[in-house]
Every structure is written in structure tokens, then in C-alpha cells.
Amino acid sequence: MEQGFFRSPKKRGRVAVLLSGRGSNFRAIHDAMLAGKINADIVLVFSNKADAPGLQTARERGLETLHLDPKAFPGREAYDAAIVEELKKREVDLVCLAGYMKIITPPFCQAFRNRIMNIHPALLPSFPGLHAQKQAVDYGVRYSGATVHFVWEEVDAGPIILQAVVPVHQDDTEETLADRILEWEHQIYPEAVRLYFEGRLEVRGRRVYILD
Ligand code: GAR
């Protein structure tokens, strides 16, 4: 388990978003930037999927986009090394995983220690991995939610920045719960990025402190 101390930088940040699909969290973060709520700019929207709708949105919004095909690389580490190179080239301060459905390899995590955030559609450490909303419905919990966390080597296990609690209704399906959780994802992900570049996130051990 990672130990140590980290304070997020107070600066105008350079953000890269990695996504694999629709990109509604990317839009929420970008909208908050356009509204002047976050002291940062998106300098790259990256996808492992050429046809990710989020990439198309990014192009329409005039943002730089990049797709690299995982199949063109000998393995996951080589693929991630290429991504890290692209991120470094653009002097990226923070990487936001926004529905990026690939597991980040340890060297990628280490290259961007405390500089990768992820959003997960459950109250971690409950229901990590895929289909978190279905896991919550099937288990029968009364509350689930969303979690923004820093990315460490273990999947869905890094220090928790923000969470939102969302009720699960008796007649919920995976889809209805996902929709309810998504509304909260769109609140807490931009908020976490805002706090980051206000220099207000401090990581001590695996606890995140929000500074006044
Ligand atoms: C979101 O619900 C996000 O929490 C989830 O994928 C969806 C992406 O939606 N991520 C994960 O499940 C990661 N394990 P979006 O493309 O509209 O932002």
C-alpha cells in the first residue's frame, strides 16, 4: 500500500481526459471549465476506441483528440508507455479517466503518481470493477452512489476524493440506477478537479484531506 504525502498544485492546470464511450463526464468537466469554475484547460481527449462518441464531441468542441489502437502494440505496458509519452509531450498535469474501460498499468500509475483521477459508479470499496450499478441492484443495497478517487496500482482502490450517496429504489433496474448515479457523477467529478487545481487536495497515506 502506498504511503506518503502529496498536496495538489495551485495553478492553471493542463488536463487530459481518457475515455472509451459516451463521454458525459468529460462534457461535465469541460462545461465547468468553460463556465470558469475550474482553473484548468483540457489539452487532450484520448481514447482507445476510434469510434468513441466522446471523441467526436471533443472534436466538435475544438479540442485536440488522439486515438491509439491497443492492437497495434505488443502489450499493455507498451500501449501505456505510448500514452504516457503523449501526455508528457503536452505537459499534462492531471489525467481524468472518464469511462476509460482499460486498466492502467503500474508504470503509467507511477509516471503520474497522484495525478490520475477516476470516477466509479458505486460507493467504493463496494462494487468495484465492471457493471457496478448492476452489482448494487443485484445485491439489494438501499444506497449506492459515485466515487471520485486517485488511481493507484490496484483497480478502484486509490484514495477517495469525493463521494455522493444515491438511493436505490425497489423497482430500479441497472439502467434507472445508472441514470440516477450519473447525475451525481456530473456534480462530483468537476468539483474534484476544481479542488485539485485550487491546491486543496492533500493525500496523507490513503486519506484525502480537503483544505479550506
Ligand atoms: C460512468 O458511469 C462512469 O462512472 C463509468 O462509466 C460511465 C461512463 O460514462 N466508469 C466505470 O464504470 C469505470 N469502472 P460517460 O462516458 O458518459 O462519462
Image (cartoon, helix red, strand yellow):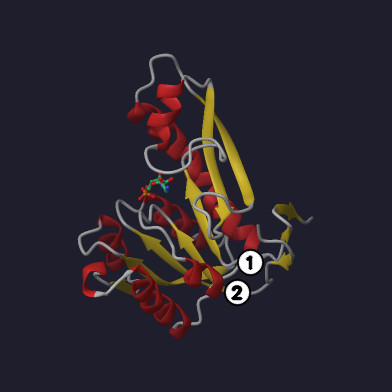
Quarter assignment of residue 63: bottom left
Amino acid marked by disc 2: Arg
Residue 59 x, y percent position in the rendering: 28, 68
Q: Earlier in the sequence, mark 2 or mark 1?
A: 2
Residue 75 x, y percent position in the rendering: 31, 70
Residue 145 x, y percent position in the rendering: 52, 34
Secondary element under disc 2, as helix, strand or loop, is loop
Residue that carries the numbered disc 2 in the rendered image: 12
The residue at the point 48 percent across, 45 percent down is: 120
Label 2 residue near ligand 1, CB within 8 Å: no
Please, is residue 169 above or below residue 34 in the view?
Answer: above
Residue that carries the numbered disc 1 in the rendered image: 197
Between residue 36 and residue 96, name the one nearer to us: 96
Please, is residue 94 above or below residue 125 in the view?
Answer: below
Q: Measure the alpha-carbon separation of dots 2 and 1.
A: 7 Å
Between residue 40 and residue 1, name the one nearer to us: 1
Amino acid marked by disc 1: Phe
The residue at the point 38 percent across, 42 percent down is: 130
Label count reads 2
Q: Do the CB atoms of the residues marked 2 and 1 lie less than 8 Å apart? A: yes
Q: Residues within 10 Å of mark 2 (few under 14, many from 20)?
A: few
Between residue 199 and residue 33, name the one nearer to us: 199
| Left or right, 188 with reference to 31 | right
| Left or right, 173 with reference to 2 | left
The residue at the point 46 percent across, 35 percent down is: 181
Quarter assignment of residue 152: bottom right
